[in-house]
Image (spheres, grey):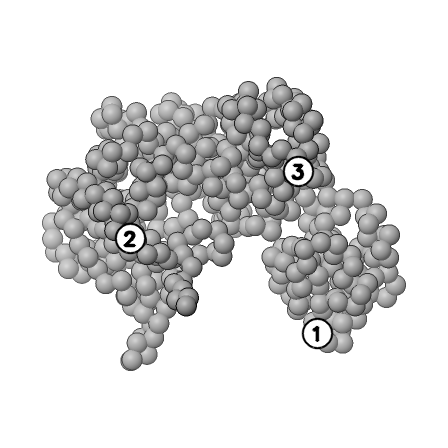
Amino acid sequence: MIHPIPSGTRDVLPDEMRERRAIEAAVRAVFEDAGYGEVATPALEYESVLARGLTMPPAYRVLDDHGNALVLRTDMTVPIARVASTRYANAEPPLRFSYIANAYRQVRPHRGHMRELRQAGIELIGAAAPHGTAEVLTVLCRALEATGLRDFRIGLGSASIVPTLLEQAGVAPEDRERLLHELVTRDFVGLEREVRRLGLDERIARVPLLRGGPEVLEQLPGDAGRLLRESVGLLAPEVRDRVIIDLGLARDLGYYTGAIFEVYAPGLGQPLGGGGRYDELLGRFGRPLPAAGFGLSVDRLHEALTR
Amino acid sequence: MSALGLTIAVPRGALMTGTLELLDGLGVDTSEVRANDRRLLFEDVGIVTMRPSDVPTYVEAGAADIGICGKDVLMEQAGRDVYELLDLGYGACTMVLASKAGEDPAAEALRRLGVMRVATKYPRTAARYFEDTGRQAEIVEVKGSVELAPLTGLVEAIVDLTATGTTLRENGLVVREEIARSTARLIANPVSHKLRAKEIDAVLEALRAR
């Protein structure tokens, strides 16, 4: 007899569970030691509340017995923003939270996407760039090292540099959106075509291709790269050596405002996780505070460690 | 590993010759690939050969660092997490809507029934095109010789890729609309794009300087 489970979900058996627990214990100890208290929030939330966070549309929606629309959370960042602005409405910032929890996403068929993913991460609320960004990157590095992962790198970019450059170049909002769409879909051919169509400086099309050491920030006009440069300047050498500046980095979540980053391990074709600054998200829940955080995929981390 | 220090996904079929010439120009020794029609993996030169529509799959997963495939494949597989780095210019072809010569049976079906049946190997590209142009179409996915479908009365029209239009003509079909143009593209895995930045940029620079 066949009793299937939904595609994009899986059973974890004792051998893997033991290894997964070890990974989670290692990162949890780092989070705890850095002052990030662990929280748990309901997997189900009101759709209207999570929608405030401008995150990806929920994949799973149910109606409760009163007709309220409930959704399964797509990440932990928005629920923690809700917790910070309601349970900690009067607490003195900065606030430090960590989590190891499941999130639920849409999948495309036959692409190996997961519907249910286990994430471990932190949120630092009330600490602005560059210090807040540097702290989050430092905890990220320590957590990855604690799991025993060796050759990982962190790609560091910005959600605001390219939009700001386009704005300064006088590109109209609707054209800006088209250019940014090419960037988010990683279509550099389309980006170059749009840049040419609009008669923009072709150097703008090359900005997202810039990546390397902190020196690539020098190639930006004006002080566009200042905040990122300052964040990198605050990092200890062992963290800074892990960082690759990447101005083409674009994450598909709507709430990022400044620095964004992703974690790479050699041999793994997709990032292990990532994060960034979301300085406007808390304001959408009524407590305007700058914030940053990251989430790591426990499954991919496990894959990187066992391959 | 190749002279480029990268694993390259090379499409078999129409784009293969152009791609191997391109790689020759970059200093990759492709003689073994040319001499051997059945082998798929050429580890010492870092080349893996495959069906064109599989190239994004291997590159997205990181099984190849970079790859070459048609824009048509990327359009059909929209949402793949790969970087589209360069328009390579060769392998030009056009995605078209075609139907039997004479009075257009597709237009007739649309007028009379409000919907037309369309056969294609590119169901997502076709569906998106009809949505964008505000027409109702019932998409029938076929795996080969799409030209057969309108001739047997399975459908009123087809959406297919054509380079010269010869096959369409020989089967008594005419192009009604041009949907999109396609050429070969260089794509890269997003993680390789960071971790092998130097190697990938060297390839890009050499190709831009062609």
Residue A105 versus residue A57: which sits nearer the camera?
Answer: A105
Q: Are marks 3 and 1 on the same chain?
A: yes
**Chain label for disc 1:** B
Instruction: Estimate how packed mark 3 is, as few (under 14), some (14 to 19) or many (20 or more) residues with alpha carbons within 10 Å.
Output: some
- Figure check: A142 above or below A14: above
The location of residue B209, given as percent across then percent down, is 62, 22
Instruction: Estimate how packed mark 2 is, as few (under 14), some (14 to 19) or many (20 or more) residues with alpha carbons within 10 Å.
Output: few
Tell me which amino acid carries mark 3: Arg
The location of residue A303, given as percent across then percent down, is 34, 41
Instruction: Estimate how packed mark 1 is, as few (under 14), some (14 to 19) or many (20 or more) residues with alpha carbons within 10 Å.
Output: few
- Residue receiving disc 2: A13
Disc 2 + disc 1, Cβ < 8 Å: no
Disc 2 + disc 3, Cβ < 8 Å: no
Q: Which mark is residue B114?
A: 1
Give me the residue at 43% from left, 52% from top: A113
**Chain label for disc 3:** B
Quarter assignment of residue A50: bottom left
Q: Secondary structure at mark 3?
A: loop
Q: Secondary structure at mark 1?
A: loop
Q: Which mark is residue B12?
A: 3
> Does residue B100 appear in this view?
yes
Of badges 2 and 3, the one in the foreground is 2
The reply, left or right, for residue A89 in relation to residue A75 is left
The reply, left or right, for residue A29 in relation to residue A204 is left
Give me the residue at 54% from left, 27% from top: B43
- Figure check: B26 above or below A159: above
Compute the Cα span from label 2 to label 3.
40 Å
Looking at the rendered image, the quarter that the C terminus of chain B falls into is top right
Tell me which amino acid carries mark 2: Leu
